[in-house]
Amino acid sequence: MTATLLAEQILNGLQFGVMLFLMAAGLTLVFGVMGLINLAHGSLYMIGAFAAAAVAGATGSFLLALAAAMSAAAAAGALVERFVIRRLYDRDHLDQVLATFALILVFSEGTRWLFGSFPLHLDIPPALKGPVTLPGGIEYPRYRLALIAIGLAVAAGLGLLIARTRLGIRIRAGENDREMIAALGVDISTLYTVVFALGAALAGLAGALVGAIQSVQVGMGEPVLILAFVVIVIGGIGSIRGALVGALLVGLTDTLGGIFLPRFFGLFLDPSSAANVGASLASMAIYILMAVVLVWRPTGLYGARA
Amino acid sequence: MKLKTLLLSAAMTALVWAAPMGTALAETRVGMITTLSGGGAGLGIDVRDGFLLAIGQSGRDDIEVVIEDDQRKPDIAVQLADRMIQSDRVDVMTGIIFSNLAMAVVPSATAQGLFYLSPNAGPSALAGRGCHPNYFNVAWQNDNLHEAAGAHANGEGYENAFILAPNYPAGKDALTGFKRFFEGELAGELYTKLGQKDYAAEIAQIRASGADSVFFFLPGGMGISFLKQYADSGLDVPVIGPAFSFDQGILQAVGEAALGVVNTSQWNKDLDNPANAAFVESFEAAYGRLPSLYASQGFDTANLLLSALAKADPSDADAFRAALEEADFDSTRGDFAFGPNHHPIQDIYVRRVVKEGDVFTNEIIGVALEDHGDAYAADCAF
Amino acid sequence: MREGAVNAVLLAGLVAFPIWAQAADEPFLITLATRAVILALAAVGLNIALGWGGMVSLGHAAFFGIGGYAMGILAFHAQTYAPLMEWPFVIEGTKSMPVIWLVAVVASALAALGIGLLSLRTTGVYFIMITLAFGQMLYYFTISWTAYGGEDGMSIYVRNGFPGLNTLVPVEFYGLCLAILLLVLALNAALVRAPFGLALNAARQSPERVRTVGIDPGRLQLAAFVLSGAITGLAGALFADLNRFVSPSMLSWQMSGELIVFVILGGTARLFGPVAGAILFVALEHLLGGVSDYWHVFLGALLLLVVLFARGGLVGFLAGRVR
């Protein structure tokens, strides 16, 4: 294992982490402000990717595709909030789980209905194609560096939004005491729709960005959804900072675990069984991480309340 | 209260009414269980369309095909198989795409005396000791295309290959199949997570390993992701894979990243034989898209069935089995015969991804293995 | 309609349906009903944790799968005549259902004890997620467990046996599963009225109050969680026998999600809620599957309507609110 390989893997872990953060940020905001468990968040990620693929295919512009992804996901999010979710705020978490589970079914098969059963094509913009050579001789894909930059920029922007703007004040107030801010004359239902659409837009953005280097297909949202839940639970539900820390932890654990565990077992097992045991443990690594964190801190790293 | 009582009794009636009413039995009933919803639906749809095209072309109206969606869930597949056997009373079954679903359905269906014709999955467990006289595979034994990739790598003079596949039985079979024929050294052997979509870490390892070639088996979305990321990594080590990641349905999603990549397949649309030319033309006319590997397998499966039905009835199991064994049909692959374990003996070709107009597709550039059977036939004793 | 009347109708339906299907010579409908009964049993198990205990577990597929693998492993060794273990003493595989059930129940109860001990340190959404984490760990473990088929799973060629019955006959196997379901429902009903059930109910509503009367709510919940896991494990063994097949998909998070759907669809903390939910779900799956390739859209829409307009699930909708 050389230092450059290690550095490259850390970059990979970071890149995976910041993309998870885009997903997790929306989930954690929606939970923090409205107390809602949204299983359909992965569908918004998928909608973003499909919208981006469709627009990129029609216009050839990646920027337009990103805009389309964010608006389509935000629109879908706002519609869902307005017509379904709004009726569920005062309900049990369980009703929310069932309703958003139903939404997954509708969105997934609805997307297949619209776009067909084959994966769609979405490519990296030409300007970001190919690798760059970083200091230390690491050859690293330009697009992945851009993903890290975009993810960190969004994290910073979101931090500012929540700390400095009027909307942010309302969001924080909403997290602390929902009844009180309504009593203070804030239009709570608009606030909810805006927060939901914001979270959806971030998920759509993540779907489009990641879709360019992965496959755009039905069902792409659910694995990411599970990981995003792992992230917000590790970080502490409702905390943006926790989501960022959790996302980076999960990204690094998953990437480095996949590399080091097989090598670690290679020290005392024969190569093929080491590969086998290592690969099995690597696929469990983030869940083990989550269980350990929760046993140690039952409300996550930055969680205030259960 | 009355409304609710009414609703409840209506629901009960609906349940009872749902039972299929006794329809007039066609002479031959074929049960097709395949994947028609969710992420793997593209493959099942192609198999179904190819199969129905051949049945339609035969002009026979005494064959009824019962088609059901397994949702890629083994328990649903088993349940559908039970229904087809117990209630639809089918004579022949076919359609399953994924090996794990085939393992759930095939052993019990053949044990109950049904014939099963596999249009796609060919797990090693059903080719060797677990073979069954009523099980016929019309596609390939799972290892075949990987073995061909190994043979092709020898032909290219590769000496140091990096190989990777998902950590599940078909993935292990793939790497075993490749190694069975590949004579060079391995620069690395990697099992990735099933369903993994980010291969940055693996690509970095390939780069660091100094390999002179890469073999990968990553079906579906995994392969799309790998190819896109590999193309963008700037690595120029040549890649070989089985056809599954380079097929008609998937290629458009990979796009430029797949251009020029070499892959192994038992079929391609430019195979030069009359049956194939007619198939490609009629498939395009009927469905408005180019046929895939899977469509050709569905089409061949139906034609095999038709050829056997012309000679015998499934109710006479021995005669029908003998008729199937003859494989007396014009395959889209040209020469086609069954080995002693009812798996194909066929040529496996090397293809290269090209662009024709706006569409990405494959062209044949050579033959990797001629009249190739499988490694498990010797273990099979009916 | 009172809840009791709804339950009676359901019960009568469960008994009458196979008789009708037998008369109509539709053995497959009996198989389908068996599936509903087994899934109902799994959901009844979950309902003890989720409905009465207030512990929303998104990892119950783990217990379902453990039960399934208990059946798969024992039957696999019996059909290959290879002992499960030779040292320090020989353990042979078995094709006998009662033995398999016992192993399934004990194994899933032990797993539930371990998972419960760690998970019950958390509450609310964190509990949902930590149970999911344990479920996923076991899921990935079975995928890479090549000795027992990995992702392909294991096929068992002949259904296991029960003394005095021919389990291969659909209606006899159905009767067996129904008997178990009714037994567990009776146990469940007794439990809810027993001091344990009352204390559990109180612990869900107000742990502090329970603590003040000298009962440790954590231990109550743990006991309920173990019982719940054991019942779901038993259902898993039956499910594996129904399909003559086990695979990691029994442990997937979607399976956990479906079990929760059964409970909510039918009515949380209602004795027959999970039963009604499972029957409705299986029936919808069966009926909608033929309507269109995109039938999941309709299933989703129907589920949405139930959540939005039939509060308290099916049983709640028919029987009115709990008094």
Image: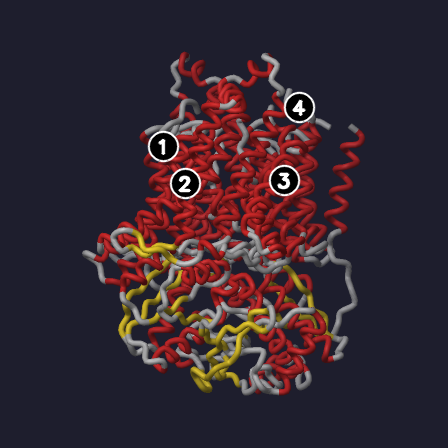
Cα separation between marks 2 and 3: 29 Å
Amino acid beneath label 1: Leu
Q: Position of residue B63 (x, y in %)?
A: 72, 74
Cα separation between marks 4 and 3: 34 Å
Cα separation between marks 3 and 1: 33 Å
In this figure, which residue is indicated by the disc labeled 4? C321
Amino acid beneath label 3: Ala
In this figure, which residue is indicated by the disc labeled 3? A76
Q: Position of residue B1 (x, y in %)?
A: 78, 28
Observer-side mark, 4 or 1, equals: 1
Left/right placement of residue B244 relative to residue C111 reads right
10 Å crowding of disc 3: few (<14), some (14-19), many (20+)? many
The residue at the point 35 percent across, 29 percent down is: A301
Quadrant in which the N terminus of chain A is drawn: bottom left
Cα separation between marks 1 and 2: 10 Å
10 Å crowding of disc 4: few (<14), some (14-19), many (20+)? few
Element class at badge 2: helix
C172 or A145: which is nearer to us? A145
In this figure, which residue is indicated by the disc labeled 2? C133
